[in-house]
Image (spheres, rainbow, N blue to C red):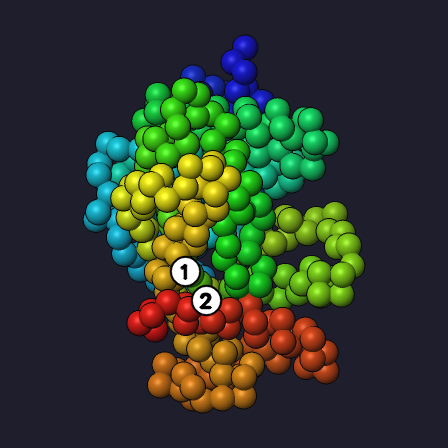
C-alpha cells in the first residue's frame, strides 16, 4: 500500500472500475446530460465504459463539461501568459482562489488548449464527503487536503501532502495546482498564506529552501470573474467575521456553493499565469539567510504577481465608485453596466443592511484598491 493512498487520485489501472461503479449514479447522468445534451444515454455510457485513464476521462468528458459551463454561464474566457510556459514541463501553480471547482478546471482547460502539462489539484476533504463526489474528484486528478485535524495529525498530513507534491512535480513530471490559502477568498483580498509555503518546504530534503522552490518552478496564477456567482452566498460568513462571531456552515453549504459556482452567471473570466519565480528567489536568497524571512519575501513576490496581473472588470470599478460615492473610475464602465450591477446588488442583498451592502461592494472593490498600490497598474 502506497503511503499516499489516503490522498491520491486514481491510478489509471483503477479508472475503469471507478467509472463502472458510478455510471448509474443520478449525478453522473445529470453531469453527462449537461455536457452532452444531444447524445443518447447509451452512447455516453458506452464511451465511459471504454475509458481506462484519467487523461481520457479529463479530455473526453471533463473538458467538454467545462466548455459547456463556459458557453452557458459566461461571456467567455480570456488568457495571458500561457505562451511563456514550456511543453512537457511540470510547474507548481499557486493561485488566488475564487471558485471551488472552476478555478482549477478552467486552468486545466487552458493548459490543454496550449499543449501544456495539466495539473493534479488540491481539494479539501470537506468538498468530497459524498462518495460520488470523491470518485469524480479522483477521476479529475484531485488529491485530498485533510481539514480540521488536531495539531499533531495536521502536521503529519501536511508533511504527507508536501512529499506527494514533490513526487508529482519532480518524479512524475506532473504539474500541481494549489490555492494560495485555505478556502476561497471571500472579501476580494487575494493574499498568500505563509503556511502554504511552509507546508511545501517540508519536503525540501537536503536542498536549501530557495534551491528547492526553484526546482518546483513556482508560477503565480491570477483568475478573475466579472461576476462572482457565489457573491451573495459569501455574505453570512463575512457578516459573522465582521462581528467577531464564529461562523458555522450549514450542512449542505459547500455543495450548494459548488453548484452555484458552476451554473451561476459569471460574465467574463480571465486567467493570467505569471513568470516562474526564479530571479526573485536569487534576490531573496542574497537578502535573507533566515528561512522564515525568506518565506515572507516569497509570499510577497507571489502576491505582487497575482495582484498586479489581476484583470479588473467594470464591476470592480463600479463597486469602488459606489463604495466611495465617487466617479473616479467612470471612464471604465458604462451607465448600463452600472445599472446592471446596482440591480444585482438590489436583488441579492438587503439594502437596509448597510454592513452587508458595504461587504458586498468591498468584495468587488478590493481588487481595485490592491492594484492601486502598484505604480501604473491601472
Mark 2–mark 1 Cα distance, whole angstroms, equals 7 Å
Percent across and percent down for residue 293 are 48, 43
Q: Along the line of sight, which residue is nearer the eye, 320 or 304?
A: 304
Which badge, 2 or 1, is on the more N-terminal residue? Answer: 1
Would you name the residue on which mark 1 appears? 307
Q: Along the line of sight, which residue is nearer the eye, 2 or 229?
A: 2
Q: Quadrant of the C terminus?
A: bottom left
Percent across and percent down for residue 298 are 42, 45
Residue 124: quarter of image? top right
Residue 50 seen anywhere in this rendered image of the structure: no
Residue 368: quarter of image? bottom left
At horizontal 59% and vertical 77% (from top left) the residue drawn is 345
Is residue 331 positioned above or below 90 on the image? below
Percent across and percent down for residue 305 are 36, 55
Is residue 174 positioned above or below 266 on the image? above
Residue 338 seen anywhere in this rendered image of the structure: yes
Q: Secondary structure at mark 2?
A: helix
Q: Secondary structure at mark 1?
A: helix
User: Dot 2, how many residues are within 10 Å of its Cα: few (below 14), some (14-19), or many (20+)?
Assistant: some
Q: Going by the image, does 292 lie left or right of 280?
A: right
At horizontal 58% and vertical 59% (from top left) the residue drawn is 186
Percent across and percent down for residue 242 are 71, 65
At horizontal 57% and vertical 45% (from top left) the residue drawn is 182
Q: Quadrant of the N terminus?
A: top right
Q: Residue 93, which numbered label? A: none
Would you name the residue on which mark 2 appears? 370
User: Dot 1, how many residues are within 10 Å of its Cα: few (below 14), some (14-19), or many (20+)?
Assistant: many
Amino acid at each position: 500500500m502506497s503511503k499516499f493512498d489516503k490522498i491520491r487520485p486514481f491510478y489509471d489501472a483503477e479508472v475503469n472500475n471507478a467509472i463502472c461503479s458510478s455510471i448509474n449514479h443520478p449525478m453522473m447522468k445529470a453531469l453527462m446530460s449537461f455536457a452532452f445534451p444531444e447524445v443518447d444515454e447509451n452512447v455516453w455510457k458506452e464511451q465511459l465504459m471504454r475509458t481506462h485513464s484519467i487523461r481520457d476521462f479529463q479530455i473526453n468528458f471533463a473538458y467538454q463539461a467545462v466548455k459547456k459551463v463556459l458557453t452557458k454561464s459566461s461571456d467567455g474566457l480570456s488568457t495571458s501568459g500561457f505562451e511563456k510556459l514550456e511543453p512537457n514541463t511540470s510547474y507548481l501553480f499557486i493561485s488566488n482562489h475564487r471558485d471551488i471547482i472552476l478555478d482549477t478546471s478552467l486552468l486545466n482547460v487552458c493548459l490543454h488548449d496550449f499543449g501544456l502539462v495539466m495539473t493534479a489539484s488540491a481539494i479539501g476533504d470537506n468538498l468530497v464527503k459524498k462518495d460520488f463526489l470523491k470518485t469524480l474528484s479522483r477521476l479529475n486528478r484531485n488529491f485530498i487536503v485533510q481539514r480540521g485535524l488536531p495539531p499533531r495529525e495536521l502536521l503529519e498530513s501536511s508533511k504527507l501532502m508536501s512529499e506527494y507534491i514533490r513526487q508529482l512535480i519532480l518524479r512524475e513530471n506532473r504539474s500541481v495546482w494549489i490555492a494560495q490559502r485555505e478556502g476561497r477568498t471571500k472579501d476580494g483580498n487575494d493574499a498568500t498564506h505563509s503556511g502554504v509555503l511552509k507546508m511545501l518546504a517540508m519536503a525540501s530534503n537536503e536542498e536549501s529552501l530557495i534551491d528547492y522552490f526553484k526546482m518546483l518552478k513556482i508560477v503565480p496564477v491570477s483568475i478573475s470573474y466579472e461576476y462572482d456567482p457565489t457573491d451573495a452566498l459569501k455574505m453570512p460568513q463575512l457578516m459573522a467575521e465582521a462581528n467577531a462571531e464564529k461562523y458555522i456552515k450549514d450542512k449542505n453549504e459547500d455543495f450548494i456553493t459548488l453548484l452555484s459556482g458552476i451554473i451561476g452567471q459569471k460574465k467574463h473570466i480571465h486567467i493570467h499565469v505569471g513568470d516562474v519565480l526564479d530571479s526573485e528567489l536569487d534576490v531573496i536568497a542574497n537578502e535573507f539567510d533566515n528561512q522564515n524571512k525568506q518565506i515572507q519575501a516569497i509570499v510577497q513576490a507571489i502576491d505582487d504577481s497575482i495582484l498586479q496581473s489581476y484583470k479588473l472588470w467594470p464591476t470592480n470599478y463600479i463597486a469602488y465608485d459606489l463604495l466611495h460615492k465617487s466617479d473616479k473610475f467612470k471612464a471604465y464602465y458604462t451607465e448600463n453596466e452600472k445599472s446592471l450591477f446596482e440591480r444585482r446588488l438590489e436583488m441579492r442583498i438587503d439594502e437596509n443592511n448597510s454592513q452587508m451592502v458595504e461587504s458586498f461592494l468591498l468584495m468587488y472593490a478590493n481588487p481595485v484598491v490592491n492594484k492601486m498600490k502598484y505604480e501604473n497598474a491601472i
